[in-house]
């Protein structure tokens, strides 16, 4: 069974809540899944590694309890993000725990590893890999990923620079498997737009930072609410890989967001001994202008679902700009 076949009728919205470093914890994942969207978190948010074992058991137990109480609307599956970069010295342990708990969906980042995909496939799990261009997309599929997360311009955290239209169009020219599209989404109509462009899911992160269940400090949540697209800075200074960050947090850290020096080469380090050099510099995407308040996750998904339904209704009516004679001519 393919990933998409396994999900038929199981979601309220075709939406994956993206794994938010530090911020995504079981409370947020469970709230997302019980609201009808795929919730996720990075394995590295659980520290030490033993906590990941506990968190995976907790998520499964809480989702099972929800499903027993609500058989008519069971929870959506959850996902764990594995950083497969060579600097992550916890990968083998985290992967083993994901296999132990039979995590339904794995999102891999920063490298494509066939042995990781094989381990997840061994129990019937699925793997989607996030990419920013066609080179990485081809490598991920060649090495056994079931699907792709296309991280386009405007996405929060580590992000690409390509237009979502170009990135998705070029991907669909050769890949017909599951695709999630990421990049500046905070509204229900954006979810529908991703589908209309050819994606199977929207991939949304920044809006979930400003939720009650997110493990973000209140100043971070407030900054998300108060910011707009013009307050997002794209730089590789923070981690060695280009990403989007909140301009006010850069200022608060003593940096000039209008005069950031770049760095040469990769300085990524996901090892257990790494130091959080910029712990108060906060990532976010260009969608922050669509986040108006800190709300419970269920309320956010309710809003997105209403906006999505309204957008579908509007699209079904057709554009008033069209000349119906052209349609009759094509039919003839």
Image: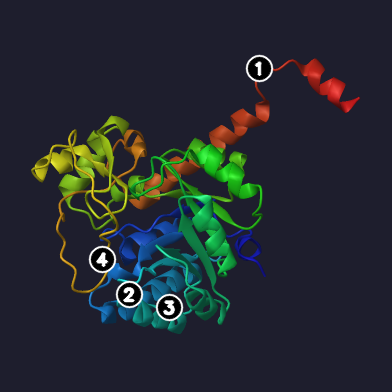
Q: Rounded to the nearest whole Å, what is the CA distance between mark 3 and mark 4?
A: 22 Å
Identity of the residue drawn at 77% across and 18% down: 324
Query: Which residue is at the front of the view, 141 or 60?
Result: 141
Q: Nearer the viewer, mark 4 or mark 1?
A: 4
- Say what secondary structure mark 1 lies in: loop
Between disc 2 and disc 4, whose residue precedes?
A: 2
Say which label, 3 or 4, has the lower sequence index: 3
Q: How far apart are labels 2 and 4 at the CA level?
A: 24 Å
Task: Give x and y (percent) for residue 168.
Answer: 56, 44
- Residue farthest along the left direction in this orientation: 254
Secondary structure beneath disc 4? Answer: loop
Q: Nearer the viewer, mark 3 or mark 1?
A: 3
Tell me: 105 left or right of 300.
right
Report how far apart the C-alphas of labels 4 and 1 lie in the structure: 53 Å
Q: Quadrant of residue 177?
A: bottom right
> What residue is rendered at 34% in x and 42% in y?
285
The residue to which callout 1 is attached is 320
Give the labeled residue for mark 4: 269
Coloration of the structure image: rainbow
Q: Nearer the viewer, residue 291 or 95?
A: 95
Question: How many residues crowd mark 3 within 10 Å: few (<14), some (14–19), many (20+)?
Answer: many
| Residue 92 visible here | yes
Quadrant, the C terminus: top right
Q: Badge 4, how many Cα within 10 Å: few under 14, some, many 20+?
A: some
- The residue to which callout 3 is attached is 98
Q: Looking at this view, is 272 or 190 the one in front?
A: 272
Q: Which residue is mark 2?
A: 55
């Amino acid at each position: 069974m393919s990933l998409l076949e396994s999900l038929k009728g199981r979601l309220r919205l075709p939406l994956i809540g993206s794994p938010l470093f530090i911020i995504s914890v079981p409370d947020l994942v469970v709230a997302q899944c019980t609201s009808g969207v795929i919730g996720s978190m990075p394995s590295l948010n659980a520290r030490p590694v033993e906590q990941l074992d506990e968190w995976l058991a907790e998520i499964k137990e809480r989702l099972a309890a929800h499903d027993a109480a609500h058989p008519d609307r069971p929870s959506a599956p959850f996902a764990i993000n594995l950083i497969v970069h060579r600097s992550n010295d916890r990968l083998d342990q985290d992967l083993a725990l994901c296999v132990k708990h039979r995590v339904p969906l794995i999102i891999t980042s920063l490298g494509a590893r066939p042995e990781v995909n094989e381990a997840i496939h061994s129990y019937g799990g699925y793997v989607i890999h996030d990419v920013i261009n066609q080179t990485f997309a081809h490598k991920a599929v060649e090495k056994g990923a079931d699907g792709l997360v296309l991280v386009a311009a405007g996405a929060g955290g580590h992000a690409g620079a390509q237009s979502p239209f170009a990135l998705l169009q070029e991907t669909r020219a050769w890949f017909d498997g599951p695709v999630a599209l990421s990049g500046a989404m905070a509204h229900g109509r954006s979810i529908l737009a991703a589908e209309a462009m050819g994606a199977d899911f929207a991939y949304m992160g920044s809006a979930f930072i400003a939720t009650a269940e997110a493990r973000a400090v209140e100043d971070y949540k407030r900054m998300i609410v108060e910011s707009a697209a013009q307050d997002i800075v794209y730089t590789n200074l923070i981690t060695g890989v280009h990403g989007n960050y909140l301009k006010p947090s850069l200022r608060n850290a003593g940096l000039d967001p209008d005069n950031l020096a770049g760095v040469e080469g990769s300085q990524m380090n996901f090892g257990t001994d790494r130091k959080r050099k910029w712990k108060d510099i906060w990532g976010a995407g260009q969608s922050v202008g669509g986040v108006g308040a800190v709300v419970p996750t269920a309320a956010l998904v309710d809003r997105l679902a209403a906006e999505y339904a309204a957008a579908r209704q509007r699209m079904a009516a057709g554009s008033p700009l069209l000349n119906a004679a052209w349609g009759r001519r094509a039919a003839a």
